[in-house]
Image: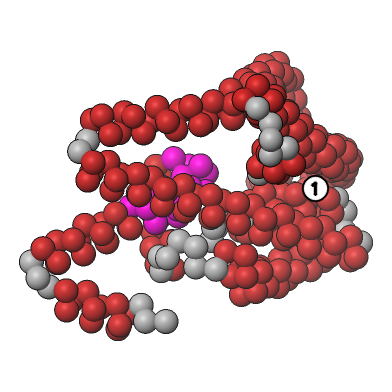
């Protein structure tokens, strides 16, 4: 989009100037992406730090309450009291947990370095892909028409364009929808005076990208975080998320996405479970548009077979009965 705007601004640019415009568009795109990532990180890290410190402060109090509760429960059961033994077990268990946390720190540090390396490589590769995307498209067209007859090459090109349209429309629409939900969650929690509203809003927004199961995946850990601070806040949060998801499912989502995929709710759930079981979270995100593409291919093959066997009336009856607007 940035490249198109720049070309419209400089319509008489020669070939060398167009290459420079393409380079500028790539730099602007990557800078915008980096700025968005940086803003999200700066929004999350202070909230995460405050939440972790509060949890660390809460843990000794919770352990003391738990020990008092155990002692109270065992007061009338002499055979189970063994107080010193229980305390020693608790102390040993605590020491072991501390040691395991310390030992895992080095692993986590190397993991963070690995993530930073992958992010750097990702931006570098994305720059090359953006700069060479037209060349790669032309080369793919040559290969396609060189391997397949014109008829099949045209069919494959049409399906590739449909796939691009499906993934682009669904994922971009879902990201916009999730961003709106994250902002509404942040505003609502800030108005109610909850702790870490920005952190919770980002978590809810990110997990909302996953269809159907996303709201539950994001709400559970955030609810547990609020439960440690104030059980009533956790209850209010659950009610608020339920209302917010109803607003998203019935108003915001349909306005932004519409019926982008063209598949029923059952097949949406089926695709999430199938591809989520195969590829985890990534499968849950891309499962719906991927299944929509597979569904479209099967539909076209079935319609082609029916027309070949002169059963066009079955197609007409089916469309009128189940897909008539």
Q: Position of residue 281 (x, y in %)?
A: 52, 44
Give the quarter of the image for residue 145.
Answer: top left
Query: Between residues 51 and 315, which one lies in front from this camera angle?
Result: 315
Q: Which residue carries the number 1 mark?
A: 199
The answer to whether residue 206 is left or right of residue 279 is right
Q: Is residue 106 magenta?
A: no
Can residue 76 be spotted in the picture? no
Q: Where is residue 71 drawn, in percent x and y?
A: 78, 48
- Residue at 83% in and 50% down: 198
Residue numbers of the magenta segment: 279-295
Q: Nearer the viewer, residue 269 or 145?
A: 145
The answer to whether residue 171 is left or right of residue 68 is: left
Relative placement, left or right, of 112 versus 135 is: right
Magenta-span inclusion, residue 290: yes
| Residue 261, position as x, y percentages in the image | 45, 61
Residue furthest left in the image? 309
Mark yes or no: residue 113 visible: yes
In which quadrant of the rendered image does the N terminus lie?
top right
Magenta-drawn stretch, dominant element (helix, strand or loop): helix
Determine whether the residue tagged by mark 1 lies in a helix, strand or loop.
helix
User: Relative to 130, is 232 above or below?
Assistant: below
């Amino acid at each position: 989009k940035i490249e198109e705007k720049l070309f419209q601004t400089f319509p008489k640019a020669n070939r060398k100037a167009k290459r420079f415009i393409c380079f500028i568009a790539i730099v602007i795109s990557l800078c915008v992406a980096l700025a968005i990532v940086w803003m999200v990180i700066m929004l999350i890290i202070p909230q995460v730090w405050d939440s972790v410190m509060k949890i660390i402060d809460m843990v000794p109090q919770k352990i003391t309450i738990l020990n008092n509760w155990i002692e109270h429960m065992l007061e009338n059961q002499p055979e189970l009291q063994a107080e010193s033994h229980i305390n020693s077990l608790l102390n040993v268990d605590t020491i072991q947990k501390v040691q395991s946390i310390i030992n895992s720190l080095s692993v986590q540090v190397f993991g963070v370095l690995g993530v930073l390396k992958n992010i750097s490589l990702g931006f570098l590769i994305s720059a090359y892909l953006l700069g060479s995307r037209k060349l790669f498209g032309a080369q793919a067209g040559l290969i396609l028409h060189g391997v397949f007859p014109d008829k099949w090459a045209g069919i494959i090109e049409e399906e590739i364009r449909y796939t691009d349209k499906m993934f682009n429309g669904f994922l971009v629409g879902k990201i916009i929808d999730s961003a709106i939900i994250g902002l509404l969650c942040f505003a609502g929690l800030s108005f109610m005076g909850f702790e870490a509203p920005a952190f919770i809003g980002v978590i809810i927004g990110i997990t909302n990208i996953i269809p159907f199961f996303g709201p539950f995946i994001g709400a559970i850990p955030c609810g547990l975080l609020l439960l440690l601070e104030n059980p009533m806040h956790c209850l209010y949060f659950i009610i608020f998320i339920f209302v917010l998801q109803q607003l998203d499912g019935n108003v915001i989502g349909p306005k932004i996405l519409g019926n982008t995929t063209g598949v029923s709710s059952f097949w949406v759930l089926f695709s999430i479970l199938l591809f989520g079981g195969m590829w985890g979270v990534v499968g849950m995100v891309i499962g719906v548009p991927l299944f929509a593409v597979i569904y479209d291919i099967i539909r076209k093959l079935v319609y082609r077979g029916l027309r070949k066997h002169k059963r066009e009336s079955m197609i007409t009856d089916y469309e009128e009965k189940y897909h008539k607007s």
